[in-house]
Image: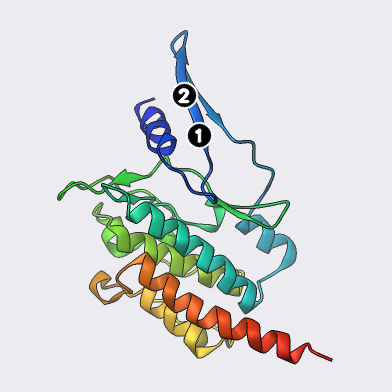
Amino acid sequence: LSMFEREAQLLVRIQHPNIIKVHEHFVDQDRQYIILDYLSGENLRKHVQLTGRMHELDVLEWAATIASMLEYLHKLDPPLIHRDITPDNIILDSEGKLHLIDFGAANELIGTATGTMVGKQSYMSPEQFRGKATTRSDLYSLGATIAYLLTGKDPEPMTQIDINEQTELRIRPAINDIIKSLTDLDEEKRLPTAERTLQKISDLYSPAIGSAKLSNSP
């Protein structure tokens, strides 16, 4: 009940177009209720299971959207760490828009406070396993989620992900490098912020769109 109430209190103050909106929470006859926007769609795990691994351009677009959500959360005062960024917690709606859900594991980053170990193993950073999640822990989870979208498989837990080295697939080296940086086991060696991650992804995404349009021109 305390986690439920905390999640509601966190969500009420969040205003982002890609994050599920909480309108109200209340207690009635010793039961707690939360009023959320209705969201119709499927999570990214289900989407990949139905359609197969995703095209690089689609993954870059989605990765940029997720990085934008994390940039917003991490810039709150105090920063908010989601701690459970996985394909299961990102919903694709009927209009093709992504939404982040499930803030039950979220934790405000206050001083040196540490939380309990939460999250799914394939998407958890080493420091999160130790119960010491930071904003860069969410970035590790983002990198693992990108890898899932590209391969259709959960990454090996507690590894730096290198798709071109660890699988038979071959993706653009620049995308592979971003994933490797995001999933470095040493958090100090990862991309430092969601803002910087978004910039790196956008630098790849925009030229790629232009090239795709040229190649499809008559």
Picture disc at residue 212: none
Number of other residues with Cα within 10 Å of mark 2, as a class: few under 14, some 14 to 19, many 20 or more:
some
Q: Position of residue 204 (x, y in %)?
A: 52, 82
The correct choice, above or below, for 198 with respect to 6 in the image is below
Residue visible at 54% across and 83% down? 167
Q: Are marks 2 and 1 in contact (CB under 8 Å)?
A: yes
On the image, numbered disc 2 is attached to which residue? Answer: 25
Number of numbered discs visible in the structure rendering:
2
Q: Position of residue 124 (x, y in %)?
A: 38, 60
Residue visible at 44% across and 54% down? 120
Residue visible at 45% across and 82% down? 162
Report the quarter where the C terminus lies: bottom right
Q: Considering the numbered disc 2 on the image, is that residue within a helix, a strand or a loop? A: strand
Q: Position of residue 208 (x, y in %)?
A: 60, 84
Q: Position of residue 194 (x, y in %)?
A: 38, 65
Q: Is residue 147 visible?
A: yes
On the image, numbered disc 1 is attached to which residue? Answer: 22
Amino acid at circle 2? His
Identify the image quadrant of residue 128: bottom left
Cα–Cα gap, marks 2 and 1: 8 Å
Residue lying farthest to the left in this orientation: 112
Identify the image quadrant of residue 143: bottom left
Amino acid at circle 1? Val
Question: What color scheme is it?
Answer: rainbow
Residue visible at 49% across and 69% down? 155
Q: Considering the numbered disc 1 on the image, is that residue within a helix, a strand or a loop? A: strand
